[in-house]
Image (tube, rainbow, N blue to C red):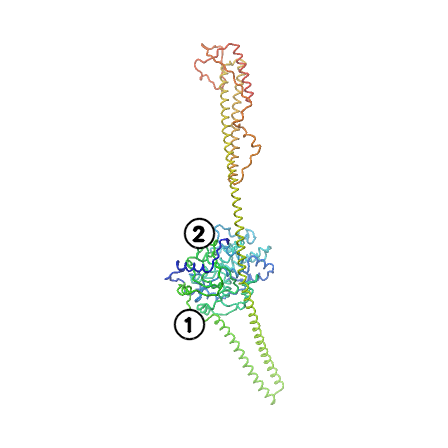
Amino acid sequence: MENRLLDRVEGKANVHRWSEQTQLEKGDSIATGHMSELSGYTRISVMQNNLQELKEIWDQWGNETKQLFYGNYRDLPYLLDVQIDERLFRALAQFWNPAYSCFSFGEVDLVPTVEEYTALLRCPRFQVDRIYSRAVNVPTFWKKLMAITGMSEQWITAKIKEKGECKCISWDALKGLILTHPDEAKKVDVFALSLYGLMVFPRALGYVDEATTDLFHRLSKRVTSVPTILAETFRSLGTYRKAGAGRFVGCAQLLLAWFYSHFRLIDKVIYRVFFEDYSPLKDIIASTRRVDVPEENWITLLQNLQSKDVEWRAPWMIPSDILYRCGSFNWVPLLGIWGAIGYALLLVLRQFGLRQFMPATHGLTQSEFAYRGADYKKRVGEISSAWNKTCRLKGVAIGPATTPEYVEWRGRRINDNIPEPNMEGARPMEEYLQKMEVEKERKEKRKIEEDRDDLKEHYKKAQVSLRRAKVGGSSDQLKKEVQEGKARAEYWERKFQEMQTRNLALEEENKGLKSKINELGRSLRWHRNHDSTVELKELKSKVEDLETALREGKTMIEQLETQGDYLKGELHQSRGQVRERDHVMREAIAQIREVAEYVQDLAVRADVLSLMCGSSSDIGRELALLLDKVKTLGIRAKNEMREQMMEAQRNMMAEMAQLLRATDKGKAPMAITEEQNEGPPPGFTPPHVPLQTEAPPRRPSTTVRPQHGPIDAGVHVNFPVGSGFNIGDNPTNPLVPNLDMVEKEDLKAEAARQLDERCRWLE
């Protein structure tokens, strides 16, 4: 997660006031009356994986492969050459102070910081705030291994093992991939994963666990691993201090490299720190002094450590702004792969050459938690959000001084069961180490003196033998003794010459060191003089980046507003089209109803005509056939109109749904083509369009007069089945038209002609 635009760089005076005020208002990390539950001695194990096979593989690689590794994963391989001093490490563990997340040696506090580990590993500066955060929904273990190794699912599944509560993959499986993988990049990735699993987070010996794989998988997203390494180092030290025993699960090599840099255990003066290709770890490995000190002596030495014994600012540390708190936290919270913890950088300002003042430490005791339980996800989210808004301190290095308020606070501070100083046996570390060197030189001097005494004795014996030879000894014996004397003399002459050569070499080395110190001083002065210019250029660059981002944001806002207006217009147009289609449908339904009523009226009129015409005549039979044809055509017309109406409704609903979908997606609705705009859907006639080109012929009006008297028995009336007119529906005395024969025949012919025209019209 990276949001460097929200970073805030503050001056030392403002941070000083804020820290002391916060500490006075909120109090210390632990209150007065606290009873420590820690044991007096922690039996911590530094058992590590055997890294010899990793080192052999690294040594076999060519320069091109190594440069590919350095470009992706920086200086991790140098840690393979750091020898772990178990006695020193066990002594260090006794001084870890869980209440303040730091080492408390005598009268000083020290702790590895994000900036120092970043410099040691040579991590890119732009990745400092992109921390690892354990995601809620992450890919499965085998999917991450597939992405890293490039192997198949079947191969990965077969290699995954269960170790305790976690899933792992063995080093043997990964070693086979490194040796045989055809892809050079994948080979480098698997080697780096093995370094993280076997050396940086060695939880299961001989295996790389799932949590380490999750962190490594996120490194490709340009996430820094430094806060995660620090978090698990601090958590492991605190866990086993509280338990009283356990195996250290963290990067012991990196912690010891940091320790050597602060305690004058580096012989070589580092002067290439400002060079681009300079590697602090490489220099530390090449120049660290090997000291053989028992654990008890280390404890005594660290217990009585004084401020003057500490190399406060590491020789390879370049001054820069430092991260001292995140978000609403008064310190720096760190997210690991198995849990989280916090540390207060304001406790160790002297490690950056700044004056030490009273730090804000409230809440540090409660900062640690493991990734278990119900509320840990919420706490992880709060820490991840806090890293989006970091606060940094910018100050001028003036030397490792302290304020009176800090001295008073440090004297009355309650620590969490760490060895108290014993000033009776106290002496500076450098003096202690020098004494060891002096004792070693004394032993060598005593040996030389003993050899010299032996030489004198041999010389005396040779003189006695020579005198005896002059009296009467054999010449052969004399020659033999003289040769032995010459050989001894030559041996001690060589010894003397070697001592002189060594002294001359030491003098030359001292001259070289003095010249390097002078060069370093000039480089430091040059850097300080040009620091303000570089800082000004960086600020100008940041301002230009901000202005560019602001312009891009304004342009994006204008585009979004324009798009919003366009979408509103399209939505309004779509709604209007829907309303228009709805109106057309209502008009079509009304027309269909009119046609249905008209057909029904035709049927009624046909029934009346059937009564008027006798069944015996040819005209009557023809009329009956025409009536059946009319009814058939009417039923067919109704069915076809109903089907056309349903089809039109379906088409209209489909178009409406398509318009609404286009509007919901933020797209412009489909333009109405000319074909769609030419007329209404099939089967519908808009209100302004006539239903037919000419009106159907209307029947002439006839007058039906009642006939009095009985109906002629010879005249039989046939009522066609299904005509809609039944005998029972008539009154007792039906009305019969009173027409003469000529008028009756004319009427029948006219009716037949009209029915024939209407049938043709319906067809």
State the mark number for residue 378.
2
Q: Nearer the viewer, residue 607 or 172?
A: 607
Residue most extreme to the bottom: 471
Q: Residue at x 46, y 18 (%)?
A: 726
Q: Nearer the viewer, residue 142 or 189?
A: 189
Decide if residue 655 is in sight here.
yes
Residue at disc 2, secondary structure: helix
Q: Is residue 642 above or below residue 59?
A: above
- Say whether disc 2 or disc 1 marks the residue closer to the N-terminus: 2
Amino acid identity at mark 1: Glu
Residue 96 position within the rendered picture, expressed as x and y whole percent measured from the top left: 44, 63
Residue 288 position within the rendered picture, expressed as x and y whole percent measured from the top left: 53, 67
Q: Is residue 173 above or below residue 452?
A: above
State the mark number for residue 720.
none
Residue at disc 1, secondary structure: helix
Q: Residue at x 53, y 30 (%)?
A: 648
State the mark number for residue 424.
1
Q: Quadrant of residue 285?
A: bottom right
